[in-house]
Amino acid sequence: MKVCIVGASGKLGKYMVQHALDRGYEVVGVCRPASVEKLDAFKGRIAVIPGATNDREVIRKAVAGCGGVLAVLAPWGVQQYSSGTAQAVLDYSPPGARLAFSCGWHITRDGLDRYSWKLRAIVAVFGGLARLTRFADLDDQVEACRRIFASSTRWTVVRGSDLAEGESEGLPVWSRHVGDPILKSNRTRRIDFALFMVAALENDALVHETPAIVGCRTPSALAHQAAREAAT
Ligand SMILES: NC(=O)c1ccc[n+]([C@@H]2O[C@H](COP(=O)([O-])OP(=O)(O)OC[C@H]3O[C@@H](n4cnc5c(N)ncnc54)[C@H](OP(=O)(O)O)[C@@H]3O)[C@@H](O)[C@H]2O)c1
């Protein structure tokens, strides 16, 4: 399968490139022209299309012929970066392609997520300051997801917990709502966030889902598993 990775040069993007290559996918990466060299380690093994990820012409070219598209939704700047990227991916991905978008727990689809005061405070303070300084626009990531949720394409929106670096622990576990006990540890290795994104391409059970993920070796994930085993 040919897979396009939009935002390939970022931390999450590079992990996704490696996982996609490990699975034998043909990879096309999109990243800002200034970031192309961040992909040097993959030279000769992937095609790179330089350009802003919300440039519709860049995305149209990059997703042509792809069976899967993995898109990093980043709220940077105030030029509709997330919503422009999402809209271009929705508009130009081949019919039937599997699409997976990354974002954080702060995105809610049905309003049934239950957030800690800490997360609410971070979103309020960071969101306000970032918009004021024109550094980032969290509301644009919300708008991007609103458009994805309204789309009839075969999408998955993967909601990452707080992230950490380190070796893979395995495929994260997930739940539909933030606040569910399994997610309590709020920690996922970034390499495993990428693994979940890539694995979602071949998991039809995740079509039209917004999984909130957490590391499979975290205390809350292990406690959930132990409780399930005790019940059977
Ligand atoms: N960081 C966290 O703790 C956290 C927690 C939960 C979920 N997430 C989600 O995980 C995903 C990846 O986040 P990450 O923190 O790991 O970052 P990341 O992978 O490093 O991704 C950042 C992306 O934004 C691009 N970017 C950076 N500055 C930019 C700018 N000024 N204008 C346009 N693009 C810019 C980067 O491209 P270049 O390579 O060109 O710079 C890269 O593609 C995001 O969807 C985020 O919402 C993150």
Image (cartoon, rainbow, N blue to C red):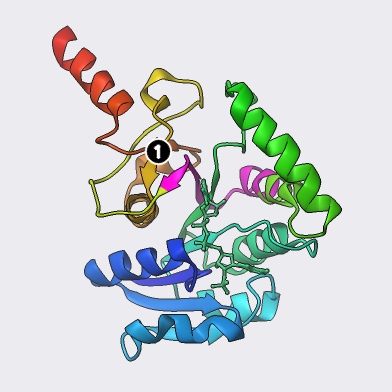
Instruction: Note whether residue 64 is visible.
Output: no
185 on left or right of 25? right
Quarter holding the N terminus is bottom left
Vertical relation: 163 (above or below) 117: below
40 on left or right of 124? left
Asked whether mark 1 lies closer than 8 Å to ligand 1, one says: no
Task: Kindly identify the residue that appears in the image at 80 percent across and 61 percent down.
Answer: 78
In this view, the residue in front, 112 or 188, is: 188
Q: How many marks?
A: 1
In this view, the residue in front, 64 or 73, is: 73
Tell me where residue 186 appears, x and y as whole percent.
43, 33
Q: Residue furthest bottom?
A: 44
Q: Is residue 156 magenta?
A: yes
29 on left or right of 217? right
Q: Is residue 89 magenta?
A: no
Tell me where residue 55 appears, x and y as whole percent.
69, 76
Q: Residue furthest right?
A: 132
Quarter holding the C terminus is top left
Instruction: Note whether residue 133 is visible.
Output: yes
Query: Circle 1 — which element?
Result: loop
In this view, the residue in front, 131 or 175, is: 131
Task: Kindly identify the residue that appears in the image at 51 percent across and 27 percent down.
Answer: 178
Q: Amino acid at mark 1?
A: Arg
Q: Quadrant of residue 230?
A: top left
Magenta region? 145-163
Where does ligand 1 appear, by image quarter?
bottom right
Task: Kindly identify the residue that appears in the image at 55 percent across and 43 percent down.
Answer: 104
Q: How dense is the environment of label 1, judged by Cα within 10 Å: few (below 14), some, or many (20 and up)? A: many
Tell me where residue 139 appears, x and y as whole percent.
75, 46
Q: Which residue is mark 1?
A: 187
Tell me where residue 91 appears, x and y as whole percent.
65, 64
